[in-house]
Amino acid sequence: MARGETIAGLDIGTTKTCAVIASSGPDGLEILGVGEAPSTGMRKGVVTDLEETVRAIEAATEKAERMAGVHVSHVYVGVTGEHMQSTNNRGVVAVTGEDREVIHADVKRVVDASKIINVAADRQIVHALPRHYTIDGQDGITDPIGMSGGRLEVDTHIVTGGSTFISNVLKCVHRAGLETAGIVFEPLASSAATLLPEEKQVGVVLLDIGGGTTDIAVFADGGVVHSATIPVGGNILTNDIALGLKTTFAEAENVKRTYGSGLMRPDEAEQTFQVKTLDGRSTREVTSSQLRSIVLPRVLEIFRLAKANIVERMARDQVLSEVVITGGGAHLRGIETTAADVFGLPVRIGIPSTIAGLTDTVRQPQYATAVGLVLFGPRGEQAPHLNGQGGGPLAKLWTWFTSIWN
């Protein structure tokens, strides 16, 4: 990637579509522009109205381009939804380099070998992410280039998605006048923007609570070991509030943001507030305990579903040290306290912090995926092996990417 070249990420969510434009410089990437538009054509990661989705993409991209002062033609697109699945696999090849020295071609072959899995005709591989390599029985190797041996193995995390669902998302991007530079499973993008290398090493759970879905990514020993999506998010809280308080969705969203609490045990005195009725002509008085009785069960449900998903797929002896919550749902007051009770682990709120040019407006949990797309997208599954290619600008930039991801 040449210095000054622009990179764009597109997060098409259930509640909002966000475009981020960044530029590569001597110190890495820097955010140039951010654009946002309401989403009405997506539901839980699936396109429900193609034209509305196209309009949201156009509006968000135009705003980002205007702020950045540049035009973009290619974007890295985030995908999510219940159709996304993951598994771990291993590939094995013989080393073919001179003096049995591992070369880039060997690394590519072994990663390709790990992709040989049973995939249904209506599914496609989105990622094959190397976790670590083994050379002649020596495991835990993060970069095998230049090492000697006869047998090279790799453990990879493979993410697959429904071809139809992904195709519809990419069709919207194309109709908006953009080309797809690559697709990224959204929790992997969010983790690139919010997680520290130390957290990925000791074991961390990322929960990205969006409007329609909650994305999960679990890291250990520096690599991702599990990723998934559960079909519940912040909008279900808003729906519950609207039904429970007999008000509109818009008013329920405002109530959730202003007065909502995810605390199991209230930390303040009872308060009352006014909520507009369905017709908007009058208001009724509601107490904080009434609102909490609506919100808390759903918050607990989201965390319990996420925990069950992780427990089902993770090894019993796997040690996890922390939970990081990001996405728009992270704004709910007290949500980290309740998550700590459910998971029995320390919890923090994850905000984008690993890239320059972020304003206070963008340094918010709801922008984690969009910011992460410009970080994760260009690296690709082979990026960790490029930092042995010398000291040129390209190698330095890939080394910087790797320092963030690994």
Image: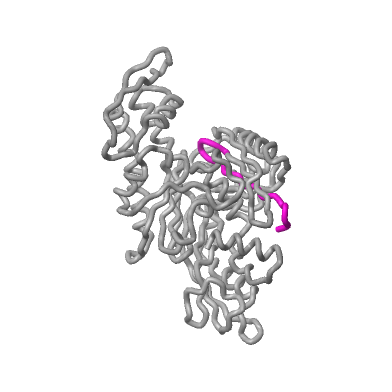
The reply, left or right, for residue 108 in relation to residue 348 is right
User: Can residue 47 be seen from the camera position used here?
Assistant: no
Where is residue 11 drawn, in percent x and y?
Answer: 57, 44
The residue under the point 63% across, 62% down is 398
Q: Is residue 13 magenta?
A: yes
In the rendered view, would you say 215 is above or below 108? above
Quadrant for residue 51, please give it.
Answer: top right
In the rendered view, would you say 245 is above or below 31? above
Work out whether residue 221 or residue 16 is closer to the camera in this orientation and state it.
221
In the rendered view, would you say 25 is above or below 37? below
Where is residue 101 drawn, in percent x and y?
Answer: 62, 82
Work out whether residue 292 or residue 110 is closer to the camera in this orientation and state it.
292
Work out whether residue 95 or residue 338 is closer to the camera in this orientation and state it.
338
Q: Is residue 230 magenta?
A: no
Where is residue 325 drawn, in percent x and y?
Answer: 42, 47
Q: Which residues are magenta?
A: 1-17
User: Can residue 92 be seen from the camera position used here?
Assistant: yes
Quadrant for residue 244, please give it.
Answer: top left
In the rendered view, would you say 395 is above or below 170? below
Work out whether residue 383 or residue 45 is closer to the camera in this orientation and state it.
383
